[in-house]
Amino acid sequence: MIKFLDIQKITASFEPEILNAVTRVLKGGWFMLGEECKEFEKEFAVYVGSQNCIGVGNGLDALRLIFKGYIELGIMREGDEVIVPANTYIASILAITDNRLTPVLVEPDINNYNLDIQLVEQNITPRTRAIMVVHLYGQACWSRKLKELADKYSLKIIEDNAQAAGARIEVSDERRAMSGIRKADMAGVKDKTVYRRTGSLGDAAGHSFYPGKCLGALGDAGAITTDDSELAGVIRALSNYGSSKKYVNDYLGLNSRLDEIQAAVLRVKLPRLDRDNQQRREIAQLYIDNISNTDIILPQTSNQKPATINKDHVWHLFVIRHYNRDKLQKFLAEKGIQTLIHYPIPPHKQKAYKDLNYLSLPVTEKIHKEVLSLPISQVIPPNEVEKIITLINQFQT
């Protein structure tokens, strides 16, 4: 059987480093808010290109705490609106409603499945306070127009970077100047392209290190990155019972902290993330080049570059579409190929959001009826990919 994701094999590829890291923590006897977490926060902040990083319990808490922080700072309040993609995992929306903010669901671009930025402005009202972009399936969702809209209406941009650790966008001359990089600084540099990573593009970003992610821990784990030091300070306190000093509580906080073992594991994995992501790009290119079944709709990238050189996309998921998705999934399962559906029910049709069930979002609903995620990872061997491709090309309805 070809697994959808062989986490055991991925974990084994980091041995004995992971075992050594866990042993170091166990022998040290300090399991919360210690040096491993502090060092990972520093290292991840540098990697992302952000001034601040706060380790938290999981990706949902990362997003929840961003909104909670803005509320404590008086930038948002109950009932304010947040524009969010309709085509996303429910966690993106849960973070909004958990803070008694109002999600405004906007349809995706049918070609790349990310938020359709062309539809954002028509959904902005006097109560809109933020735009959440989700870098879905590992592809960066960003454009100059998005930033211009945020500036025009004084909106915060919050990134849900749960699926796109390591993705980066090319920085234009204008953005390069805004980043403090001068053309003179690039003299003598062979590749003068400058990139910024997802997680450093907006005002704040939530990250997930769930084990199946491109940068995965051995359990739940997450982080927040931001250049706003005031927001970072509030969030750090909120994640620790609302306390920045032991037994002194300034806020009605939560208990959501990155533990030392997970931080130590992430420190082992982080230096290899770019290499692992590149291997995922190579697998994606194999699928794109060789799946020839005309009933299959292959994923498209927003910049139309080949997968192998497209830094915007880390291919956390390789998602195809087929009008008879369930039959295709059954066919592959019978042949020993494990696939998953991300996601079978859109958030606005979930029982949890029965007050949104009336919404008609045809693009989102079409996507959720047709998508199927194929196996992809840095450890899947090419012969297994070739087998999957052969079977998909043989499939007939």
Image (cartoon, helix red, strand yellow):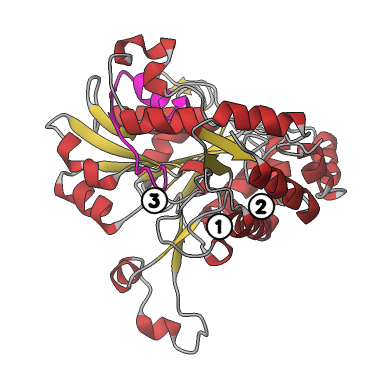
* Kind of residue at disc 3: Asp
Mark sitting earlier along the chain (2/1): 1
Q: From what the image shows, is residue 347 above or below residue 332? A: above
Left or right, 244 with reference to 214: left
Report the side of 125 relative to 38 (left or right). left
- Quick check: 387 above or below 343? below
Report the residue marked by disc 3: 227
User: What residue is shown at x 23% (from left), y 47% (from top)?
Assistant: 118
Numbered range of the magenta stretch: 90-113
Up/down of 177 relative to 287, above or below: below
Secondary structure beneath disc 1?
helix
Mark 1 residue crowding within 10 angstroms, few (<14) / some (14–19) / many (20+): some
Kindly indicate whether the residue at mark 1 contacts the one at mark 2 (C-beta within 8 angstroms).
Answer: yes
For the residue labelled by badge 2, is the local secondary structure a helix, a strand or a loop?
helix
Residue 179 shows in this picture = yes
Residue that appears at 80% across and 53% down:
383
Residue 73 image offset from top left, x and y in percent: 28, 32
Tell me the distance, in whole angstroms, between the alpha carbons under discs 2 and 1: 9 Å
Farthest residue to the right: give it. 16
The residue lying at 51 percent from left, 61 percent from top is 311
- Reading the image, the residue beneath label 1 is 47
First of labels 2, 3 by sequence position? 3
Q: Residue beneath label 2, please? A: 270
Q: Residue furthest bottom?
A: 188
Considering every residue shown, the one lying at the far left of the view is 126
